[in-house]
Image (cartoon, rainbow, N blue to C red):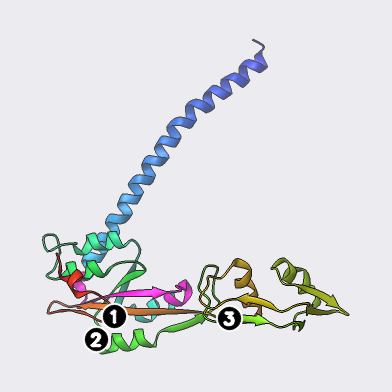
């Protein structure tokens, strides 16, 4: 075999030999990292349970990370939030009477369903209720969000610059330029109340300045060493009580 071909063959063999163990090593590290991360969260929650006097479960709608970060920063001197896998948070608290780390904490675990998180605090209950009730942030709705109202644009001129006309057509709007003015050539329904927003509808609503999403936090239950109580309507107390 010519020397150049032999060198190429050797390089290929070296690449194959090096590639396989590298992949195995990466997957192994990833799994270990995942386990370590979960254990860190479990330990952090258990330490927080010993430090804070009350635990709340809250639900959230239309999460906005920046606003939530500001809320956490506001309360960091007296409280701590945990968001993530409900299953991991349940393991930390205990999912039954047999494995709960404090009395009645298994009830808190049973409320951790769907878009929920933990709020541990030393603030009095009245202050917590006020803070969560007042927390609200309006924003533009994203794709898949449910429209809160019908938005329909009537045939005629629109308040957009002529440069926007190609983009509006890409969003499915029947528009044209008439002497530099963007016009709708027919009535156009942007979205229907109660129906999910398409990517195009979400973009158009943003252009129109119409906000349909409200980021809210809702308290579902409260735990303290002395008691456990449900705070939200619609929760089945019998499901929570069963161990």
Mark 1 nearby-residue class (10 Å; few <14, some 14–19, many ≥20): few
Position of residue 182 in the picture relative to residue 112 (left or right): right
Position of residue 205 in the picture relative to residue 123 (left or right): right
Query: Circle 1 sits on which residue?
Result: 78
Mark 3 nearby-residue class (10 Å; few <14, some 14–19, many ≥20): few
* Extent of the magenta region: 48-68
Residue name at image x 71 percent, y 79 percent? 187
Label 1 or label 2, whichever comes before in sequence order: 1
Mark 1 → mark 2, Cα distance in angstroms: 13 Å
The quadrant the C terminus occupies is bottom left
Q: Are marks 2 and 3 in contact (CB under 8 Å)?
A: no
Name the secondary structure under disc 2. helix
Mark 2 nearby-residue class (10 Å; few <14, some 14–19, many ≥20): few
Position of residue 103 in the picture relative to residue 32 (left or right): left
Name the secondary structure under disc 3. loop
Query: Circle 3 sits on which residue?
Result: 150
Q: Residue 14: image x %, image y %?
A: 52, 24
Mark 2 → mark 3, Cα distance in angstroms: 39 Å
The quadrant the N terminus occupies is top right
Task: Count all numbered tags in the image, as a single digit.
Answer: 3
Query: In this rendering, does residue 157 appear at all?
Result: no
Label 3 or label 1, whichever comes before in sequence order: 1
Q: Are marks 1 and 2 in contact (CB under 8 Å)?
A: no
Q: Tell me the mark number nearer the camera, choosing from 3 and 1.
A: 3
Q: Residue 133: image x %, image y %?
A: 36, 87
Is 63 included in the stretch rendered in magenta?
A: yes
């Amino acid at each position: 075999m010519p020397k150049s071909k032999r060198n190429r063959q050797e390089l290929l063999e070296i690449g194959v030999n090096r590639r396989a163990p590298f992949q195995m090593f990466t997957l192994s590290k990833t799994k270990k990292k995942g386990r370590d991360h979960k254990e860190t969260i479990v330990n952090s929650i258990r330490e927080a349970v010993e430090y804070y006097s009350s635990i709340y479960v809250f639900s959230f709608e239309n999460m906005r990370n920046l606003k939530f970060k500001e809320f956490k920063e506001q309360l960091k001197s007296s409280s701590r939030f945990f968001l993530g896998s409900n299953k991991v948070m349940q393991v930390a608290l205990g999912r039954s009477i047999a494995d709960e780390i404090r009395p009645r904490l298994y009830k808190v675990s049973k409320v951790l369903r769907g878009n929920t998180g933990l709020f541990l605090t030393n603030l009095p209950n009245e202050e917590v209720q006020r803070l969560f009730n007042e927390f609200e942030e309006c924003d533009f709705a994203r794709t898949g969000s449910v429209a809160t109202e019908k938005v329909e644009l009537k045939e005629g001129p629109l308040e957009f610059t002529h440069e926007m006309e190609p983009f509006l057509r890409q969003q499915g709007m029947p528009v044209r330029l008439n002497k530099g003015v963007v016009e709708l050539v027919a009535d156009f329904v942007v979205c229907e109340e109660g129906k999910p927003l398409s990517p195009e509808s979400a973009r158009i609503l943003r252009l129109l300045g119409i906000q349909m999403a409200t980021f809210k936090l809702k308290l579902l239950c409260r735990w303290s060493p002395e008691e456990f109580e449900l705070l939200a309507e619609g929760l089945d107390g019998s499901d929570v009580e069963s161990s």
